[in-house]
Amino acid sequence: MTEVVICVGSSCHLKGARRVVEGLTKLVTERGLTENVKLSGSFCMGRCEEAGVSVKVNGEIHFVDPDQIKEFFDNVIVGGNR
């Protein structure tokens, strides 16, 4: 099971956290990965100075541009499980 935690704190919210949540949820569902990928939210991860929304995948933090959700999903979430 891949665990994905998306920051929904105020700074990440302003950077587009809602779009990231919605985009990742849609991709997980469309690709039939609801049994393999667990999505959840978290308040501030303490990395507000970084560009992008803070997202942890299996404990490793990434910074996601809301316009790059599909690429992040394919390369990190799906690609990391091959």
Image (cartoon, helix red, strand yellow):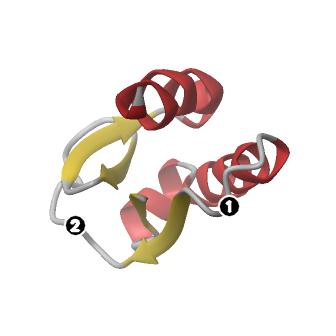
Tell me if 60 is positioned left or right of 29 in this view.
left
Quadrant in which the N terminus is drawn? bottom left
Circle 1 residues within 10 Å: few <14, some 14–19, many ≥20: some
Element at badge 1? Answer: loop
Q: Residue at x 32, y 35 (%)?
A: 51
- Badge 1 is on which residue? 34
- Residue 52, by quadrant, is top left
| Above-or-below relation of 44 to 76 | below
Name the quarter where the C terminus is drawn. Answer: top left
Residue at image location 29% in from the left, 40% down from the top: 62
Residue 54 on image: x %, y %: 33, 51
Residue 27, by quadrant, is: top right
**Mark 1 residue type:** Thr
Residue drawn at the location 55% of the way across and 56% of the way down:
36
Residue identifier under label 2: 45
Give the crowd class for mark 2: few <14, some 14-19, many >=20 residues within 10 Å.
some
